[in-house]
Image: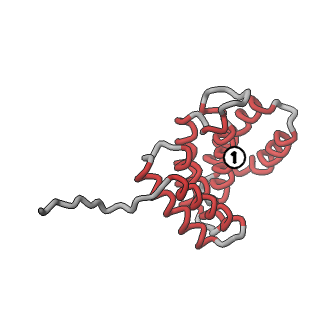
Amino acid sequence: NMLPIMKDGFTKCQMKDIVELIEYGRSCLNKRQLNEAHIALSEALVYLYQVVGVMHEYVAVACSLLAQTYYAGSNIEQAILFEQRALCLYERMGGGSSNSGTSGSSSGYDSYQVIHSHNFLATLYSKLKFGHKMAAKHMVRYLYLQRIACGQYHSDMNNSLILVSQNSHLI
């Protein structure tokens, strides 16, 4: 008896393995082992695309961590690309699962992850030679969302306003 065997080109990977890859990539990033972090996070991203698709919280986390890896390696353009992907996913998904169970809003546009992404994008764009207008756009959005989330007298608000005033001559 001959039976046909169906094979696909993708390696089977469980979600716990993907989470372990992301955590390993995060720990390598914290230790400044950028090559290892990049390999682990890129592999996790490939498996995530196969297992859950492109619209998932872990995809956004992996993209954001890859952006941090590229930033640490001084590749600002790639860092911007991956952080923009993460921002788009966080906005569309409502900020991820960490938003549930808190007193925050249900919208993805003012979640913690979105606020953090705008701040990081402002930092990244400010490093580019002609990116100061985009940096200002993301910083204004960051300040607005931060004021909504934390109030105008929060200590981070003061630090952010100082950074804006230092860079306002470049706009």
Going by the numbered disc 1, the residue's amino acid type is Asn
**Vertical relation: 61 (above or below) 113:** below
Q: Quadrant of residue 157?
A: top right
Within 10 Å of disc 1 (Cα), the crowding (few <14, some 14-19, many 20+) is: many
Above or below, comparing residue 103 to residue 95 in the picture? above
Q: Position of residue 101 (x, y in %)?
A: 69, 30
Residue 137 in the image, given as x and y percentages of width and height: 64, 41
Most foreground residue, 159 or 34? 34
Determine the secondary structure under disc 1: helix
Q: In the image as oriented, which residue stretches furthest toward the left?
A: 1
Q: Is residue 66 above or below residue 108?
A: below
Q: Looking at the image, how many numbered discs can be counted on the residues? A: 1
Residue lying at 40% horizontally and 53% vertically, measured from the top left: 50
Name which residue lies at 63% across and 53% down.
Answer: 125
Q: Quadrant of the N terminus?
A: bottom left
x 64%, y 40%: residue:
114
Residue 94: which quarter of the image? top right
Whether residue 144 is visible to the viewer of this picture, yes or no, is: yes
| Foreground residue among 68 and 93 | 93
What scheme was used to colour the molecule? Answer: secondary structure
Q: Position of residue 55 (x, y in %)?
A: 47, 42
Residue at image location 27% in from the left, 61% down from the top: 7
Residue 141 in sight in this render: no
73 or 93: which is nearer to us? Answer: 93
Q: Is residue 137 left or right of residue 163?
A: left
Please tell me which residue lies in front, 78 or 91. 91
> Given the current orientation, which residue lies at the most extreme front position?
1
Q: Which residue is under mark 1?
A: 119
46 vs 78, left or right, is left
Dividing the picture into quarters, in which one does residue 62 lie?
bottom right
Seen in the picture, residue 79 relative to 59 is either above or below; the reply is: below
Residue 72 x %, y %: 66, 66
